[in-house]
Image (cartoon, rainbow, N blue to C red):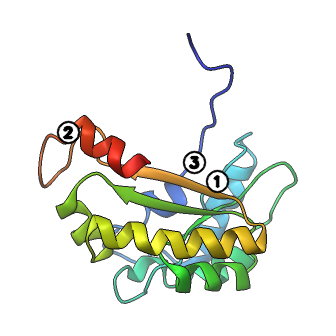
Amino acid sequence: AYPKRVKVVEVGPRDGLQNEKNVVPTPVKINLINMLSETGLQVIEATSFVSPKWVPQMADHTEVMQGINKLPGISYPVLTPNLKGFQAAVAAGAKEVSIFGAASELFTQKNINCSIEESLERFEEVMKAAREANIPVRGYVSCVLGCPYEGKISAAKVAEVSQ
């Protein structure tokens, strides 16, 4: 049976821009999100509170969050890979956050510079802080259908990380 509801999350302003070689100017990012807000989308992942050292494209996360027009009925979650990112996101006005794990050890190392096990421990800290602050958290798992570095990923590994 099909689900009664599907939640579409637009991640372009974060995932679509984070690997661009040239840094996209902050006003362009804000304008992109504002235009996406006019399309009928209900969830737009706006930015990522990651270290600017690792992802220079997201160094303006606070300015983006404070510069967008937040329309009623639309949520603007942000990616927060650790407690420091979560705290910065909340300080910038985030009302919802996202965390992500990966079913691939190598992908996790290359993306967030730690093991799968360490990433899950970091998420526990974020989840605890989010519960205390009454901030919704959306979790997602990368590489469920395969990894650009490792290739095929077992269903067992996906299930393990998903729990």
Check if mark 3's residue and mark 1's residue have beta carbons within 8 Å. Answer: yes
Q: Where on the picture, by quarter, is residue 117?
A: bottom left
Q: Does label 2 or label 1 sit earlier along the sequence?
A: 1
Query: Is 49 on the left-hand or right-hand side of 89?
Result: left
Residue 44, which numbered label? 1
Q: Give the class, few, some or many, for how many residues have Cα within 10 Å of label 3's Cα (few <14, many ≥20).
A: some
At mark 1, the secondary structure is: loop
Q: Which residue is rendered at x = 42% and y = 87% of the image?
A: 52
Q: Which residue is rendered at x = 19% and y = 42% of the image?
A: 153
**Disc 3 versus disc 2: nearer the observer:** 2
Q: Where on the picture, by quarter, is residue 116?
A: bottom left
Residue 154, which numbered label? 2
Q: Nearer the viewer, residue 48 or 108?
A: 108
Q: Nearer the viewer, residue 9 or 12?
A: 9
Q: Does label 3 or label 2 sit earlier along the sequence?
A: 3
Report the residue marked by disc 3: 10
In the image, residue 125 lies at what x, y percent? 54, 76
Q: Label 2 is placed on what type of residue?
A: Ser
Query: Is 44 on the left-hand or right-hand side of 24?
Result: right
Q: Is residue 24 visible to us here?
A: yes
Q: CA distance from mark 2 to mark 1?
A: 30 Å
In the image, residue 154 lies at what x, y percent? 20, 39
